Image (cartoon, grey):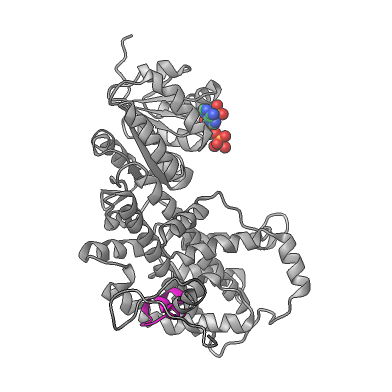
Amino acid sequence: TNQSLANVGVIGMAVMGSNLARNLARNGYAVAVYNRTTSKTDAVIAEHGHEGDFRPSAELADFVASLERPRRIIIMVKAGRGTDATIDSLIPLLEEGDIVVDGGNAKFQDTRRREEKLRGLGLHFVGAGISGGEVGALEGPSIMPGGSVESYQALGPILEKISAKVDGEPCATYIGTDGAGHFVKMVHNGIEYADMQFIGEAYVLLKALGLNHTEMADTFATWNTGDLDSYLIEITSEVLRKVDEKTGQPLVDVIVDAAGMKGTGTWTVQAALDLGTPVNTIAESVFARAVSSHPELRAASQQALSGPDGTFQVADRDAFIDAIRQALWASKVVAYAQGLDEIRQAGVEYGWDINVAEVAKIWRAGCIIRAKLLERIRSEYAAGNLVTLLEAPSVAADLAAAQDGWREVIATAVRAGVPVPGFSAALAHYDQARAPRLNASLTQGLRDYFGAHTYRRTDAEGTFHTNWSTDG
Ligand code: ATR
């Protein structure tokens, strides 16, 4: 039979790729599917073929030939060499104007390189960040596509259709050229690291206060009904409530205390270092995972280092629990401000015309950091030309209201020997950012002393050098 052509194709039938293909099919698209190992394609069709109009191919050439033009091909394979290998085998089969989408967690520098190469061949390359895990891929993720404006005209309607929705509005929008989409996805993950670090610090403090796991779970569930309303707070409550079937203990107490990571948090910090943008909350969160995962350092330090034992007393337990909530909220606001500022600075550096309000908008649902706070962030950025989220009047007022509790929590933790690097980094940033003078003038004096690096004066234009040595 002379079948019509497929609307869109997906390469890679592992979990993310097959779920994205099913999402497309469920939304009424005819979806061409291909996997290097054909048995995976067959398994997906056997299990889910009834869900929609799938067009499986065993050969890549047949897959390409089964697509309407301009072809829209979404690659969902192992990031790195898998992506390059797939692109290289596609290139000879494609025609001018076809659109190749990388939906994996690529480094934005790789995306810039690939985009440049395909652009030179008359092809469009779109680096699309996709967040939401396997459930999001199937039911509606947050999608952050970067590439040519022209490619978005052909691709955008499909991505918007399959994305998560907030009041009918899609959590997918055009981000900017070349690596912009993967950059934004990278920072999304960096913020996710900070969110999780803050939640972890709140958990340790609640535990030190003497709450049992049910009480902690209830506390997070209550917080989830207010300003902190978010996916990560919601699932924290569920994780704390889980009892291990084998031991009858809270499962979280049975899990080895060493956090893993796949790299996007590290990339976020590396990119920020290159841009000179402060993201100390995200950096501390990456380093906190690093400390947790060095058993030899922890064992040696546990033997050698003395200090308070991590317990403390408070006069009013409920008031202190609420102060922890304030510390968590305020720190979260600082982390979002830092991440969005990194995105804004990257836009300037790489020539992306990124609309920060739109970024906050498509993070409101579908993705891991989805939170009630993001609607507020969206409206603050949309309303004013903000240098930083922290200056928005309503945000500044709420941070002012939260700061007594925030400071009290950190001071108590420091005295008791409970590490709170995330909360502390966030507060340090808050106090640095609002300080009329920092310690930089002395730094400049020292630099001029030993290296004649010169300094500027508060009362005159130009650069100055002093002969600092008084014995000369
Ligand atoms: P998982 O997500 O299940 O851990 P993975 O190793 O990350 O699996 O691979 C995900 C997808 O990338 C698979 O579809 C895989 O194809 P195979 O099923 O044939 O292994 C695909 N993939 C990985 N490396 C690839 C490569 N070099 N070329 C093409 N596809 C590749």
Quick check: 375 above or below 455? above
Q: Where is residue 92 in the image (x, y as percent from the top left)?
A: 40, 19
Q: Position of residue 260 (x, y in %)?
A: 61, 53
Furthest residue toward left: 383
Pick whichever, 152 or 321, lies toward us: 152
Q: Examine the rendered structure and indicate whether residue 284 appears above or below residue 343.
A: below
Q: Is residue 415 visible?
A: yes
* Residue bounds of the magenta highlight: 427-442
Point out residue 200 in the picture as x, y percentages from the top left corner: 56, 66
Question: Residue visible at 38% across and 82% down?
Answer: 437
* Residue plotted at (25% across, 33% down): 154
Q: Position of residue 156 (x, y in %)?
A: 27, 38
Q: Which residue is drawn at 46% across and 82% down?
A: 405
> In the current view of this chain or complex, which residue is farthest to the top?
1
Q: Is the magenta stretch mostly helix, strand or loop?
A: helix
Q: Nearer the viewer, residue 98 or 12?
A: 98
Q: Quadrant of the N terminus?
A: top left
Please check the rendered image and state whether residue 435 is part of the magenta-colored stretch, yes or no: yes
